[in-house]
Amino acid sequence: MEYYSSHIQNLIEELARLPGIGAKSAARLAFHLINQPEETVRRLADTLVEARSGVRFCRECCTLTDEELCPICSSTARDHQTIMVVENSRDLAAYERTGRYGGVYHVLHGAISPALGIGPSDIRLKELMRRLSEEDVKEVIIATGSTLEGETTAMYISKLIRPTGILTSRIASGVPVGGDLEYIDEVTLYRALEGRRAL
Ligand code: ZN
């Protein structure tokens, strides 16, 4: 049964597709938007479209950026021989906030999850292996989350890298199991990085 106009119903359904937005929140947001001046809503819509079409993947590390090469990859002040592998650009931002990591990154955009049908070819692993074969890399620090998916991915990557002889390490636990890196404080993240062990 349709309680609302079909426009509002469609809006609620679209908003409910967003992560963390349930049916109730979607309805609340929809009615909030409907009550805004049209120009406010248009600005939001334009910002969404501009963000989506303006953002690209860094040629080197695959993070989301405005340029062909992200500011970290194009910096000569960074240690390009150390690559930290993270699941997404939010995790990269979390490590950058510690201000204690001087290497570069590689962003996978996901983690291997047999349960969700996400395999090694669905994340940016090919790109990582290409970098390792073309660049002079001394260490790969695997900083995927300590979820089942994060651990599976870490194990897979370490096996993949082993034949190259490049030192591979895993951040220490201390990052709680099932923890989302984004919400962990900087000190804990830094300790996890410092306490990494070779695989
Ligand atoms: Zn980059």
Image (cartoon, rainbow, N blue to C red):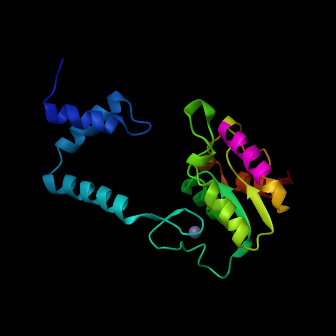
- Which residue occupies the extreme top position in the image? 1
Which residue is found at the position 69% from the left and 35% from the top?
148
Instruction: Between residue 77 and residue 31, name the one nearer to us.
Output: 77
Image: 115 above or below 189: above
Q: Camera-side residue: 126 or 144?
A: 126
Which of the image's four quarters has the N terminus? Answer: top left
- Residue 23 image position (x, y, % from top left): 34, 28
Residue at coordinates 68% horizontally, 76% vertically from top-left?
78
Residue drawn at x 18%, y 34% is 8
Ligand 1 image-quadrant field = bottom right
Residue 152 on the magenta span? yes
First to last magenta residue range: 149-160
Q: Kindly tell me whether residue 194 is visible in this rendering.
A: yes
Residue 83 rendering spot, x and y as whole percentages: 71, 64
The answer to which of 198 and 184 lies nearer the viewer is 198
**Residue shown at 86% from the left, 53% from the top:** 197
**Is residue 102 at all visible to an observer of this figure?**
no
Q: Is residue 45 left or right of residue 155?
A: left
x and y percent of residue 115 in the render?
A: 60, 30
Q: Main secondary structure of the magenta part?
A: helix
Q: Which residue is farthest bottom?
A: 76
